[in-house]
Image (cartoon, helix red, strand yellow):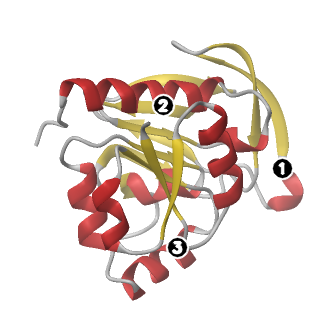
Amino acid sequence: MLKIGILALQGAVREHAVSVKRCGAEAVLVKSAEDLGQLDGLILPGGESTTMRRLIDTYNMLKPLKQFAMHDKPVFGTCAGLILLARTISGSDTSHLGIMDVVVERNSYGRQVNSFEASLNIKDIGRSFPGVFIRAPHISEVSEGVEVLCEHEGRIVMARQNLLLACAFHPELTPDQRVMAYFVKMVREAAATGAKIPK
């Protein structure tokens, strides 16, 4: 069975684990760099990106996370996970993992009180996906090689770059498993072919 890790330092960990299991993979809670060695793929969940980065640094996981992503293992960032993946964060001189060639805008839909749900049409996944947006970011720019999978009201809210997948919404907070099933399929295909992200 595929083993998909969820970075379990802060954020919507349990909900992602449930979704992974529903899609036929084993969910592994990742709390240290040592936990990465057994995984076929990894999810960076929604939460608070600054807090997550502080905990990543506390547990010396920044370099191991980068190394995991830059080899043959798919990584999926949701909401704050998108911010962690982004090469550039608008208004900031620094990034976190900085491995996905996108520019991200934080809190672009307002505060938590402004949370909403929208029906999304996602390339290669399907129509009318219930996107849950909570203090959501969005992708303002993509580089060549990044495929835009979904936009909402003119803002990019989901994209893929080789084995990196990211979205601004919370697919784990809906019973619709299509987005998670798409990532599990990415992990399965990568495990079968040994595909690697180009350096």
Q: What residue type is labelled 1?
A: Ser
Q: Which of marks 1 and 2 is in front?
A: 2
Q: In which quarter of the image is residue 10?
A: bottom right
The location of residue 155, given as percent across then percent down, is 60, 33
The residue identified by callout 2 is 184
Residue 155 visible in the snapshot: no
Closer to viewer: mark 1 or mark 3: 3
| Measured Cα–Cα span from mark 3 to mark 2 | 24 Å
Question: From this viewpoint, is residue 38 visible?
Answer: yes
Q: Which of 5 and 62 is in front in this view?
A: 5
Q: Which badge, 1 or 3, is on the more N-terminal residue?
A: 3
Q: What residue type is labelled 2?
A: Val
Q: What residue sits right under mark 3 in the picture?
A: 52
Q: Which residue is at the far bottom? A: 58
Residue 115, numbered circle: 1
Task: Specify the quadrant that holds the C terminus.
Answer: top left
Relative image position of residue 103 (x, y in whole percent): 41, 47
Disc nearest the viewer among 3 and 2: 2
Residue at the (33%, 29%) spot, across then down: 146
Of residue 107 and residue 31, the one placed in the foreground of this image is 31
Residue occupying the point 46% across, 75% down: 53
* Residue 15 shown left or right of residue 42 in the figure: right
Which amino acid is tagged 3?
Met
